[in-house]
Image (cartoon, rainbow, N blue to C red):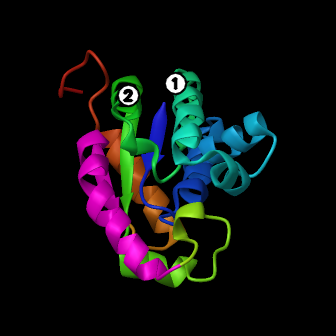
């Protein structure tokens, strides 16, 4: 299992699909799986039930999906729960797609689907999310890939090269 983590808009879904295609693996987006389970949009559920109820569902979905081989694109807040960080790190290879708040703001400034970015100053919210979550992403990740100034094909190639360099379980660092 390969899991992609990072702030909203960092490219987890787009990159995850491409990495899965290149590796011949299944790809699952946890947000899509959550919406399928809930029968409504995350934003609708978030607005009516609150963030904690959403995080409960997210944790259950990650617990189920993280035992299946494939590429898993997580929601930006998946790392907020210690159980999610532990499951992802223990069950697979975790890749942090790092992007600056300013870079994400340029990508997301007109987005209306992400509940945590609605209302107020989106750049300020992204900066706050980065300050809160960056240490959690770093704690969870096996490696970090900076997305700044990198095309999608180059980003996918960097991830695949990094995966090739990782030791296989039980094999140590020797090939």
Nearer to the camera, 149 or 42 = 42
Q: Position of residue 151 (x, y in %)?
A: 49, 73
Give the CA separation, mark 1 to mark 2: 9 Å
Q: Is residue 137 left or right of residue 108?
A: left
Q: Is residue 146 left or right of residue 175?
A: right
Write the residue at 64% across / 40% down. Answer: 28
Predominant secondary structure, magenta span: helix
Which range of residues does the magenta coloring cover? Answer: 120-145
Nearer to the camera, 94 or 32 = 32
> Callout 1: 10 Å neighbours few (<14), some, many (20+)?
some
Which badge, 1 or 2, is on the more N-terminal residue?
1
Quadrant for the C terminus in the image:
top left
From where the camera sits, is residue 100 visible? no
The answer to which image quadrant residue 64 occupies is top right
Write the residue at 56% across / 26% down. Answer: 60
Q: Is residue 126 left or right of residue 17?
A: left
Relative to 79, residue 18 above or below: below
Q: Is residue 158 magenta?
A: no
Helix, strand, or loop for circle 2?
helix
Q: Position of residue 117 (x, y in %)?
A: 53, 70
Relative to 144, residue 115 above or below: below
Residue positioned most to the right: 39
Q: Which residue is mark 2?
A: 83
Q: Position of residue 63 (x, y in %)?
A: 52, 24
Helix, strand, or loop for circle 1?
helix
Q: Position of residue 171 (x, y in %)?
A: 25, 18
Q: Which residue is mark 1?
A: 63
Write the residue at 67% across / 72% down. Answer: 112
Q: Is residue 128 magenta?
A: yes
Are the residues tagged 1 and 2 within 8 Å (C-beta)? yes
Write the residue at 60% across / 33% down. Answer: 57
Q: How many marks?
A: 2
């Amino acid at each position: 299992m390969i899991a992609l983590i990072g702030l909203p808009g960092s490219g987890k879904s787009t990159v995850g699909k491409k990495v899965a295609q290149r590796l011949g693996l299944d790809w699952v987006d946890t947000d899509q799986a959550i919406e399928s389970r809930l029968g409504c949009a995350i934003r609708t559920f978030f607005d009516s039930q609150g963030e904690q109820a959403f995080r409960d569902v997210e944790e259950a979905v990650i617990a189920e999906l993280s035992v299946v081989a494939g590429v898993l694109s997580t929601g930006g807040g998946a790392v907020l729960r210690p159980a999610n960080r532990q499951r992802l790190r223990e069950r697979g290879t975790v890749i942090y797609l790092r992007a600056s708040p300013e870079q994400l703001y340029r990508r997301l400034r007109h987005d209306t689907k992400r509940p945590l970015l609605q209302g107020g100053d989106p750049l300020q919210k992204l900066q706050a999310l980065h300050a809160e979550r960056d240490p959690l992403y770093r704690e969870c990740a096996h490696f970090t890939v900076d997305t700044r100034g990198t095309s999608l094909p180059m980003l996918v190639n960097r991830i695949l090269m990094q995966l090739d360099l990782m030791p296989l379980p039980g094999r140590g660092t020797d090939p």
